[in-house]
Image (cartoon, coloured by chain):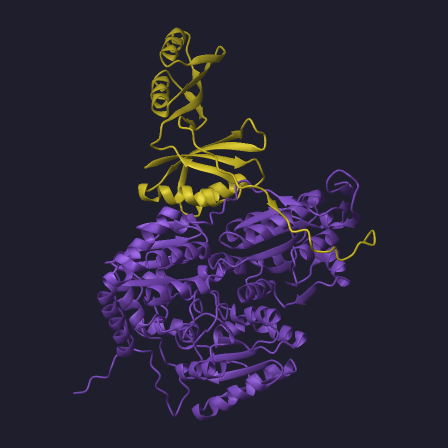
């Protein structure tokens, strides 16, 4: 089944590798993954969709929470959340199809972001199933080229973020040497 | 990077180079000894070590530096530190890092890296250490500027030593060692995502106490977590308070003294008959700092089928990973046991309710122990491996540090040797890394110079770390290297014999070197013993020798470890001994 995981991670080199490492070490395939900075530039939000046995879902969240760079990992698969995906699509349109394509795009809430004699570039957001349909419909007009963003999600539940407090380092150890510059 | 920087903006503190700053941080972490091997990019650090009081032990292979650091950590509970250069130095650490990861051993590995401007250019001796060791460590760091170094070093030690301990690697480029900065000590570290739950849920602890008093056939299943949490005394208090049979895993031997009346033995693939029968028949497993490893549980579906489970572990991911817990308690096992023992004391009036059933249960376990104890039969013509272990045990008296390698000898040592204290039994449990035993003994002997330290190794594993003979000679470490030499990779031969139709494939080890010449070449004593009646005096001579000693013990080549649970079997389906000849 597909599991949707939302992660709050430190925006540090290697953080993504650690998260994907938890998945690849177990042979799980990532269906989609998005990462971007949060309001706090030191943190990033990741949304991951992964194909997994249902029984392993809890273990996966625990393993991700174990990562030092992960502040919070939550399973949004069944919890209230808004899920959206963006698709950018180029469709080659003959002169007689152009009006029909725009009409159809409108039904899906898509808008044209570029237009040329060759055809259109369209942008649509929505849940993944709706976008699948949109892509299917556009295919019927001719050659298309599609880029999908992967799912992003926001939980509708307030999840308490528990963070570890700072740790004081013991200062009692004397410095071994303090006679200036060392080569 | 600028040639000079500051730690905190203000130009306070002494101006030092990165190498010296690293040594300052290690000193603040109370590091006493580093095991390492120099290389090109760590030259600035070795230059700083030249006139620094920190002790550096030069090993002969980086893998053994990390194994020795593990030996040090396992013997003391302190963080072990190893040091290797970039590229091959760092890649040579990998096996030992995984070993420390599997057994939750606190180790900080410091590796050199090529200069920051060369990273990614396939420079000489460059390897992506940060990427390679990501999955071999609890956490790892690449230090990109000197200003970050002190913070990172202290974070590394904090992560290695706290929570579920483990290895942490710090990769430091050469120009970071060379750059200079005004060093001022770090006062705080902050790892917001590193959450350690120590206290244990009070309601769950109360439920656990209730469940314990309601049980007719309780047993304690204690593991390496007891050692990591220094909870042996609390374990003993629990066991005595509830008077329940107790098994200690391969990682947990010594958590409860071997001679304790409630102690059975180790459970699992080569566990005792009584341990495995008790694990199968119990109605309540009190699992403390264990992870229901497949070598303990056998076929998981058939494991402890009647038991409820109380599972205490500091790592939330261990709870419910292999076996569902009825009472999960995330916490430091010492803190949890302190509270659980108090709760049990407060509710002690419940104890008599099930006492008759529990007395019968204890008697049943004792019967199992008497029915099938470990075989102690001695031969007059050849040294049986069991005989060797019994003789080592006689000399140790449950007080010596025993570092074991991996294989048959490891299982016999675990079965036959007594450990009256924690941190005496040191072995590669989870990873099963051959070559571990001898370098681990070097680390343990460095940590405990006045203790008797045995390295019990097979003729296979010993030859994987044989270059460290130079290290024991150099450092005058009186390690007693006991080679249980059966001329085979014994465990491989045992499986080929039992499960592969006796087709012994690449398991025979010929050409073991003459120990007298071998040890002699390094300037210390070695000999071979092959007659059973000479074994005792040979071991005594080894122990009485003030320096290191290499004793090659020729044992019967075809002896197998029993009991044995075949792979995939339930643990009560043990093979108790070799097939008996049929008499017609």
Chain B's colour? Answer: purple
Using the image, determine if residue B32 lies above or below residue B508: above
A154 left or right of B244 in image: right
Q: Can residue B117 be seen in this snapshot?
A: no
Using the image, determine if residue B293 lies above or below residue A150: below
Q: Nearer the viewer, residue B383 or A106?
A: B383
Marks counted in the figure total 0
Residue A20 horizontal/vertical position (percent): 47, 41
Using the image, determine if residue B376 lies above or below residue B216: below
Chain A's colour? Answer: yellow
Extreme-right residue of the structure: A180
Q: Can residue A131 be seen in this snapshot?
A: yes
Indicate the quadrant where residue A13 lies: top right
Indicate the quadrant where residue B561 lies: bottom left
Using the image, determine if residue B118 lies above or below residue B390: above
In the rendered view of the protein, which quadrant contains the N terminus of chain B?
A: top right
Q: Nearer the viewer, residue A162 or B550?
A: A162
Indicate the quadrant where residue A90 lies: top left
Residue B206 horizontal/vertical position (percent): 34, 51
Extreme-left residue of the structure: B584
In the rendered view of the protein, which quadrant contains the C terminus of chain B?
A: bottom left
A44 left or right of A24 in image: right
Residue B46 horizontal/vertical position (percent): 73, 60
Residue B238 horizontal/vertical position (percent): 38, 62
Name the residue rendered at 39%, 65% in the picture. B249
Name the residue rendered at 51%, 55% in the picture. B165
Q: Nearer the viewer, residue B193 or A75?
A: B193
């Amino acid at each position: 089944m597909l599991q949707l995981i939302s992660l709050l991670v430190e925006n540090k080199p290697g953080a993504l590798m650690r998260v994907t490492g938890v998945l690849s070490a177990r042979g799980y395939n990532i269906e989609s993954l998005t990462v971007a900075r949060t309001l706090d530039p030191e943190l990033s939000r990741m949304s991951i969709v992964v194909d997994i046995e249902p029984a392993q879902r809890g273990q996966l969240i625990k393993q991700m929470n174990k990562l030092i760079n992960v502040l919070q990992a939550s399973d949004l698969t069944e919890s209230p959340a808004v899920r959206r995906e963006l698709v950018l699509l180029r469709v080659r349109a003959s002169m007689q199809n152009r009006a029909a394509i725009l009409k159809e795009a409108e039904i899906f809430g898509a808008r044209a972001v570029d237009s040329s004699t060759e055809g259109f570039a369209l942008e649509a957001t929505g849940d993944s199933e709706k976008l699948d349909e949109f892509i299917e419909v556009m295919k019927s007009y001719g050659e298309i080229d599609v880029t999908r963003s992967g799912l992003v999600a926001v939980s509708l539940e307030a999840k308490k973020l528990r963070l570890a407090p700072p740790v004081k380092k013991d200062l009692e150890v004397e410095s071994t040497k303090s006679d200036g510059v060392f080569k | 990077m600028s040639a000079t920087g500051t730690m905190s903006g203000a130009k306070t503190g002494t101006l030092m180079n990165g190498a010296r700053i690293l040594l300052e941080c290690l000193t603040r972490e109370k590091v006493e000894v580093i095991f390492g091997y120099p290389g090109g990019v760590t030259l600035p650090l070795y230059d700083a070590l030249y006139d620094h009081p920190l002790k550096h032990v030069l090993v002969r292979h980086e893998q053994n530096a990390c194994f020795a650091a593990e030996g040090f950590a396992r013997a003391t509970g302190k963080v072990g530190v190893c040091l290797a250069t970039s590229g091959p130095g760092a890649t040579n650490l990998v096996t030992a890092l995984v070993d420390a990861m599997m057994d939750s051993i606190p180790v900080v590995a410091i590796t050199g890296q090529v200069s920051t401007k060369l990273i990614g250019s396939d420079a000489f001796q460059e390897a992506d250490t940060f990427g390679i060791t990501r999955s071999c460590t609890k956490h790892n760091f690449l230090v990109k500027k000197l200003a970050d170094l002190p913070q990172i070093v202290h974070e590394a030690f904090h992560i290695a030593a706290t929570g579920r301990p483990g290895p942490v690697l710090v990769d430091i480029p050469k120009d970071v060692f060379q750059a200079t900065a005004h060093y001022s000590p770090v006062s705080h570290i902050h790892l917001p995502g590193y959450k350690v739950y120590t206290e244990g849920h009070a309601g769950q602890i109360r439920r656990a106490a209730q469940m314990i008093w309601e049980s007719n056939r309780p047993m304690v299943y204690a593991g390496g977590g007891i050692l990591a949490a220094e909870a042996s005394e609390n374990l003993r208090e629990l066991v005595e308070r509830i008077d329940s049979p107790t098994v200690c895993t391969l990682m947990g031997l010594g958590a409860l003294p071997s001679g304790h009346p409630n102690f059975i033995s180790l459970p699992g693939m080569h566990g005792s008959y009584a341990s495995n029968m008790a694990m199968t028949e119990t109605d309540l497993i009190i699992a403390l700092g264990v992870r229901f490893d497949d070598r303990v549980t056998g076929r998981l579906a058939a494991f402890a089928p009647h038991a409820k489970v109380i599972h205490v572990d500091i790592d939330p991911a261990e709870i419910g990973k292999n076996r569902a817990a009825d009472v999960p308690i995330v916490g430091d096992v010492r803190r949890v046991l302190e509270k659980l023992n108090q709760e049990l004391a407060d509710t002690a009036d419940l104890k008599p309710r099930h006492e008759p059933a529990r007395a019968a249960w204890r008697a049943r376990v004792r019967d199992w122990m008497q029915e099938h104890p470990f075989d102690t039969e001695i031969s007059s013509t050849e040294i049986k491996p069991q005989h060797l272990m019994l003789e080592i045990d006689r000399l140790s008296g449950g007080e010596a540090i025993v570092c074991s390698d991996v294989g048959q000898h490891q299982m016999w040592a675990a079965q036959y040797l007594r450990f009256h204290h924690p941190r005496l039994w040191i072995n590669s449990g989870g990873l099963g890394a051959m070559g571990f035993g001898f370098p681990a003994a070097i680390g343990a002997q460095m940590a405990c110079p006045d203790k008797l330290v045995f390295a019990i190794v097979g003729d296979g594993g010993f030859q994987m770390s044989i270059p460290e003979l130079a290290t024991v000679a150099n450092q005058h470490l009186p390690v007693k290297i006991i080679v249980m030499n059966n001329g085979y990779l014994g465990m491989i031969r045992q499986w080929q014999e039992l499960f592969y139709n006796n087709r012994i494939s690449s398991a025979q080890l010929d050409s073991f070197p003459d120990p007298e010449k071998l040890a002699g070449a390094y300037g210390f004593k070695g000999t071979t013993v092959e007659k059973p009646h000479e074994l005792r005096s040979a071991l005594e001579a080894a122990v009485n020798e003030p320096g290191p000693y290499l004793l090659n013990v020729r044992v019967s080549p075809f002896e197998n470890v029993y009991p044995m649970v075949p792979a995939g079997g339930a643990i009560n389906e043990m093979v108790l001994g070799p097939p008996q000849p049929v008499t017609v």
